[in-house]
Amino acid sequence: MLLKKQFSLRTLQHYYQANLPKRQAGQKFLALYFANEIWKNKTAEIMKHPGTDSKVFDEVIDFAKAIGMVPLSLHKEQPGYILNSLLVPLLDAAQMLLLKGVADTETIDKTWMVATGAHLGPFAILDVVEINTAYNISLTKAKATDDPDVEKLANLLKTEYIDKGKSEEKREKASINIPTPISQNQTF
């Protein structure tokens, strides 16, 4: 199924709850999630629900292998799958460090990269995810929680990045570390 950018697709729990009488169809229902830049990051998170047939689950694992992906099996539903369950707290923490004036984006990225051996820091990752996505997540979270810091973060992302033309529509290389992420410079 292909969707345009403006559409959202809720996965298993929402489908399953809405279609409880159709349990048989649910036996063949699961989620297959690819992360950004699948040509480099070859993960395929395969998430089943309690009614997913094991044979169907195994067939999708085999399919992921056949298309050159690394299948990652989720045996129960997890909002955000594995990758985003790990990644979102990191990105949230990095953005809060920036918001509170603890350090700039380059220092936060450098700290993460040097300390962990990672190839990208959290702000370089946000360049891949795209700043509009981070903004929309922050805005939604701010409205849901009434957290003033998250509201300030959403405002910062809008005024300092999106409103200044650093959003996905106008970016050529990166939105935060323009034009080339500083982490790719030899002097970094």
Image: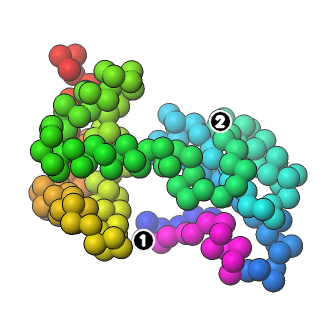
Provide residue 90's location: percent of width, then percent of height.
37, 43
Q: Which residue occupies the foreground of this view, 81 or 174?
A: 81
SS at badge 2 = strand
Q: Residues within 10 Å of mark 1 (few under 14, many from 20)?
A: few
SS at badge 1 = loop
Label 2 or label 1, whichever comes before in sequence order: 1
Q: Residue at x 81, y 64 (%)?
A: 51
Whether 186 is drawn above or below 136: the answer is above
Work out which quarter of the rendered image holds the N terminus and state it.
bottom right
Residue at label 2? 70
Query: Is residue 161 visible in this depiction of the protein?
Result: yes
Q: Residue at x 86, y 73 (%)?
A: 24
| Disc on res. 6 | 1
**Looking at numbered disc 1 in the image, what kind of residue is underneath it?**
Gln
Whether 75 is drawn above or below 107: the answer is below
Provide residue 176's location: percent of width, then percent of height.
21, 44
In the drawing, does residue 128 fall left or right of residue 171? right
- What range of the chain is rendered magenta? 7-18
